[in-house]
Structures are given as C-alpha cells and as structure tokens.
Amino acid sequence: MPTDIRRLNEGVRGSRILLFSINQYDFPYPVFPLGAAQVEAALRNAGHCVRFVDYNVNLGPIPELIAEFQPEFVGISLRNIDDVLIQTRETFFDVLLNLVQEMRLHTNATIVLGGSGYSIFPEELLELSGADYGIQGEGESQFLALINALNQKRDCTHLSGLVYRQNGIVRMNQRSRVESPNDIAIPDLSPEITDYYLRRSSMLNLQTQRGCALQCCYCTYPLLEGRNYRQRSAESIAEELAQMEARGARYVFIVDSVFNTSHAHVTKICEAILRRGIKLKWCCFLRPKRLTIELLQLMGRAGLTHIEFGSDSFCDSVLEVYGKGLTFDDIQQSSELAAEANIDHAHFLILGGPGETEQTIETTIANSKRLPNPTLMARVGMRVYPGTPLFDQLNADPARPQLPPLLKPYYYIAPPLTQDGVLNRLREAAAEMPYWIYDDPPPEYYKMTERLRAKGVVGPLWSYFARLQRLGGLR
C-alpha cells in the first residue's frame, strides 16, 4: 500500500463504500472509467469495502443494491458534462441529479461527488444535487481523508479541494494538495467490467502522468490536474500494461493531456515496454512540436500505432490566439515525421474560435493540402468552460454581454462568423478533400464500427472512416 494512503487510514476501520461511474456516452465508443477505477483501487488499498457500479455494465435496481450492501458512503463520478458537439449540445449531469435523489429515498449514507466533469462545475452541481460533499480535482487521497475525518467525527472543512455547505451556503476550498505519481493506484476491476470495454471499444485506458503546463485558451486540464507535470515511473507503467495484457487487452489508449511532455519520459516508458516484452498496441495524444524521427521510431517499436495531434488550427495567427505555442511549420514537420515512421495519425481542429476569420479558415484548408495523407477531425465553435483563459477573456470584454450559465453548453464563435457558415464551408471542403471529417458521422459509420469490431479490429477507427470517405463509401 502506498505510504500516503497507509498514513491516511491508520487506526480507521474499513467503511462500506458504494462507488458509481455514471458515464454512458458511447461516441465513438464507450470509454473505460479510469478515474473512478483509480479511486476505487485507492479505497480498497486503504482497507475499505467497495462496491463498484458502472452504469454501462452492472447497474441494477438501486433499492435492491442499497438493501444488500448497506453503504455508509456513496461516491458518484461524473466524467463528462456534455458531448462537446455544437450541433447536439447533449448534457449528462441530469443522471447525477437523479441518482442523488434516488439515493436519498433509500439510504442515509453520506454522498460525495467527484470526477472530471463534476470538477468543472463543483459548486453548482453540489447545490443542484443536494449531495453532502464534493471533491474538486484528484480524488484518491482526499476522498480517503474525508471518510476518515467523518468516521472519527473530526472537522473536515479544511480539506484541499473539498466542496461543502456551511450555514446553508456552498463553499469550496482551494486545492493545495496533489497526488504523488507513486500513489496513483493501478485499477483492479472485475472481469465483468474490463471484458465489457474490451468487447465494445477494444481498449483500456492508461495514464502515465498528471498535470498540464500548456496554455491552450479553452482547456480544463490545468484546472483539473494542475500545471505541474507529475510523472509515474516507467516501471509502474510497464507493470500496469503487463496486467492489462494478462487480462486479454490488445490495445490501450494513453489519456495524458499530451504524452510527449519530455523526450526522457517517453523514452523511459518505451524502453520499459520493450524490456518487458509487452506486445500491446497503443494510441496517445501528442503535441505536434519538437518530435524527432528517432523518438517516433522508438515509440513505434514499443507498440504505438495511432497518434492524435491536438493541432486545433493550421493558421499561425489563430494558433497564437488559441495559446498553442506552436506554428503550422511545427505541425507539418510532425506530420511528415509520423508518416516517415509509418504511424497513422489524425489532427483535431477547432474552427471558429477567437481570432478566426473567413480568411484564416481558408488558410487552414489550404495548408491541410500540404500534409501527408492527413485525417482531419474538425469541430465548429469553442466550448467555454469557467476558469479557462477564454472564459476570463470573454468576461473581461466590456463590449460583450455577460456569459450565460455554462452548465448548459455555450460555444464561442468569433464574429462575424456563424455556426452555419463555418459548417457549410467544412461541407464544401470535405466534398473536395474527403480526409476532412466533421459533424456527427452518418449511420454508415456506426455500421462500419460494428463490422470492424466483430472482425477483431482494435484501436481508433477514424483512419478507416477517412479511407472510406476517400473511396466515396460514406456521406
């Protein structure tokens, strides 16, 4: 058991904890609940009795579950606030509100909220739900500390990141504690849960580090994990991958905000994978800057088959306003190196954000033709979240009306651009250049997904989608 967790639980009896992962969004595939699974492992390692309920897999009637397990604490993890698609703007927090309401009918257990989605709107969701407490940001140690304080009838209102009520008013403590990378527990969930995700999405998830020091104007990673990189050891990563392989996994998605925070970090992990003889294939988010052919070839030997570049734009002026800290030359060079290393890759783009004009969109479209065999995943508009640089910028503009409540998805599109105008230009670009993928996929995409998964194809399917579009098989 990690030292910090052992210290937190000294002298405390184990509690019965019912832990829910309520994410059911399955586009383009259901995602293994890594964050909740890490919290579950930390609780078990500390000696608590945990029942893990995944809404995708093993959700049964709540009254029967409560009657059987008799929880003393209920943890609810909300992974996503919404689908981040301007056309649909589907939200997911109603599931949380309904679950808390049903819990109140059947148990007096203390209800604690957490998860990445919850952590973006911690005070609002505690108020709306009527839950007892929330934890903003990383939850492993702070959930344990909260449970121990309550069990020992000690004051808990000083805890880092805690959201609570005081005299009927919701308050939130500033986060002063972050997890040590060596205390991030390796998930050990039931075969029922892992097998579901291997069957439905073909992959499990892995996190090699937390934190993000980048300055992207829309991004919530620094709010959720802090700005300092905390990197796990290469040996712990290799051990977790080996355990996944033993469970039958063939593919893994590395969920770090960007994997290539340093060449040394990537190199150590790849070398550890090769030493252990792990045969898993994997995908990761990479920053398209300062890559080398030697590093990409090493990653390829260690199992990397797909790269998702968070490029956002192919126009330098827009990249600057977005806070990306890179140029189109960096993006082009990274694409060429990935092609040289024979690693499939896609660029994710946000069109219409601050600094965007009709001309900058044309620059992005024109520059896309300079990339080697690209796959481009484009979205219209920039989702605004509280606490981000974009949020601060919009609030500081006296000429703008006040922002609406942001639980309901709100997208910024730089005037005089409009959602329909940008989307129509994307349609025209895709008709000429079928490597542009935009909007929700057509029904044929889902049929293709089912066929490929049935044939044992693993990993992301955007490359297949792009190839079919090139051949005129979709849209």
Image (cartoon, rainbow, N blue to C red):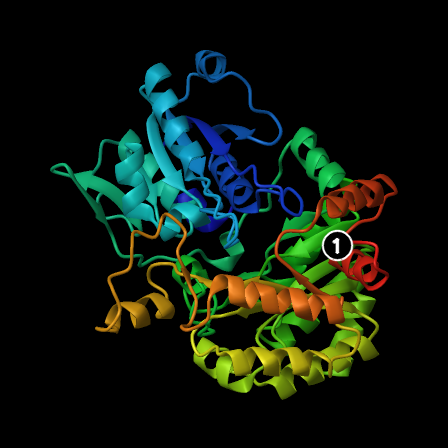
Task: Give the camera-side residue of 39 and 64.
Answer: 64
Instruction: Pick out the residue farthest to the bottom.
Output: 329
- Compared with residue 281, is residue 47 higher up or lower down, i.e. above or below? above
How many numbered dots are placed on residues in this image?
1
Work out whether 225 lies above or below 268: above
What is the x, y in percent for residue 17? Answer: 44, 28
As helix, strand or loop, the secondary structure at mark 1 comes to loop
- Where residue 311 sits in the image (x, y, percent)? 59, 73
Q: Nearer the viewer, residue 406 or 473?
A: 473
Residue bearing mark 1: 475
Residue at point 76%, 61% (across, down): 273
Could you say which quadrant of the image residue 363 lies in? bottom right
Judge whether residue 291 can be spotted in this image. no
Vertical order, 190 against 89 (above or below): above
Q: Position of residue 174 (x, y in %)?
A: 27, 57
For the question of whether residue 455 can be seen, the reply is yes
The residue that appears at 31% across and 59% down in the rendered structure is 176
In the picture, measured across the screen, residue 357 lies left or right of residue 267, that is left
- Residue at x-position 48% and y-position 32%: 20
Q: For residue 37, what is the image quadrant?
A: top right
Residue 146 spot, x, y in % from top left: 32, 39
**Residue located 41% across and 35% down the image:** 94
Quadrant in the picture for the C terminus: bottom right
Relative horizontal placement of residue 92, taking residue 169 as reference (left or right):
right
Classify mark 1: residues with Cα within 10 Å, few (<14), some (14-19) or many (20+). Answer: few
Q: Identity of the amino acid at label 1?
A: Arg
